[in-house]
Amino acid sequence: MRTALEIAFWLSVGLIVWTHLGYALALALLARVLRRSSPRLPAADASPGARSTAGELPSLSVIVAAHDEQEVIAAKVANALSLDYPRERLELIVACDGCSDATAARAREAGADLVLELPRGGKIRAQDAAVERARGEIVAFSDANALWEAGAASALVGAFGDPRVGYACGQVRFTQAATGAAAGNQEGVYWRYELAVRALESRLSSITAGNGAIYATRRSSYMVVDPIMGHDLSLPFSMVKRGLRAVYVPSARASEKMVPSLAGEFARKRRMMSHTWPIILRGGMLSPRGYPPGYALMIVSHRLLRYSTPALHLLALAANAALLAAGARPLYVVTFALQLALLLAASLAGAVRARPLLIARYYVLSTASPAAGLWDWLRHGTSASWEAAEGTR
């Protein structure tokens, strides 16, 4: 019995360490080895594919799905129209998803090329409708509150100089009013790590997830998915199954406001995870068909195991407690104390705003969000519609 408990404990701990740390270290080591043996392997910050000259740039449709975004839509339109991209090759479409405010009128006044006023159907269906009307060879997508740097469009489109690329996402940077212990949400710490891992995945194979602030696909490769299944997770692995690459282009940069509070960040992640589980369990991610072996390992390591960490943490804690009850050796007193210390640090963060405590609280709540999202989906399903996250406008 004790042996079984020890196996359960160390297996769960090992999988947690692998998905959060070991996987990234393995990618970095593999990239270094391959870089030495194959100098043609691109650097981490290199755009995949050749960047075209201005005369060769393909036509581009930038699509912004918006629901009641009257406060920010004019700035978004102005930002898109100021991109360093030939105006005659650039089309801006604002797809209003059941807007009840002045979003459509303000988008037109700001100069959007096409404004669609659609019934409420959710972000994905608004994007689908915009792609149907788009004229661009490349269709790019952005959020209403995300501002692109001037060269972002050219950098993103440059990825498609490689005919094997079907999907490309850029780098989104989160801005916040406060930093360090003054910032309630410590998402920035995780996000910098996530982007580093994404760069390694892109160098070696394909990324396992994108982001909604800045990404693009060929119009001919665009995929219509279930409206509750967002593009961020469903498009990259689906492109790989079709024999295409999904890449990360860090030189294509955008910025948007971070959710200011940790409670708001937890709510955002919980909502995202309620959209994620349908993709995992019935959207094709679990099926290995079409995956190269290395990419299959990436999906397991970076996605499936990460989303399983709530169960792995509970298993580790329960097995550790059972081992102590069975009179296990002092090592398990230390491991149990470390687990309790993490929970205590997270609970103290509400009263003591020290950054290590805030990071502990961020980790505990972000780890709990997949379980909360799964509960929400199983209990009452997931709506295709969405609302702006707290404090991001």
Image (tube, grey):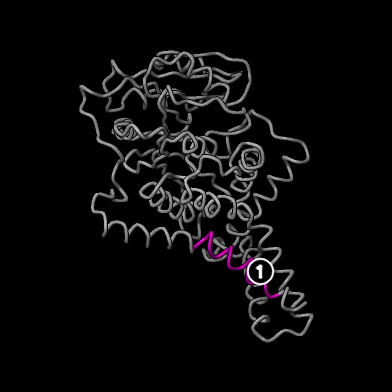
Give the main secondary structure, helix, strand or loop, of the magenta stretch: helix
User: Residue 257, image x and y in percent?
Assistant: 47, 41
Q: Residue at x 51, y 49 (%)?
A: 296
Q: Which residue was labeled with disc 1? A: 344
| Along the viewing direction, whichever of 268 and 262 lies nearer the viewer | 268
How many tags in the picture?
A: 1
The range drawn in magenta is 6-21
11 within the magenta span: yes
> Is 381 situated left or right of 250 in this image?
right
Above or below 258: residue 212:
above
At label 1, the amino acid type is Leu
Q: Residue at x 54, y 19 (%)?
A: 96
Above or below 292: residue 301:
below
162 within the magenta span: no
Viewport quadrant of the N terminus: bottom right
Secondary structure, mark 1, is helix
Above or below 14: residue 292:
above
Label 1: few (<14), some (14–19) or many (≥20) C-alpha neighbours in 10 Å:
some
User: Residue 134, image x and y in percent?
Assistant: 43, 16
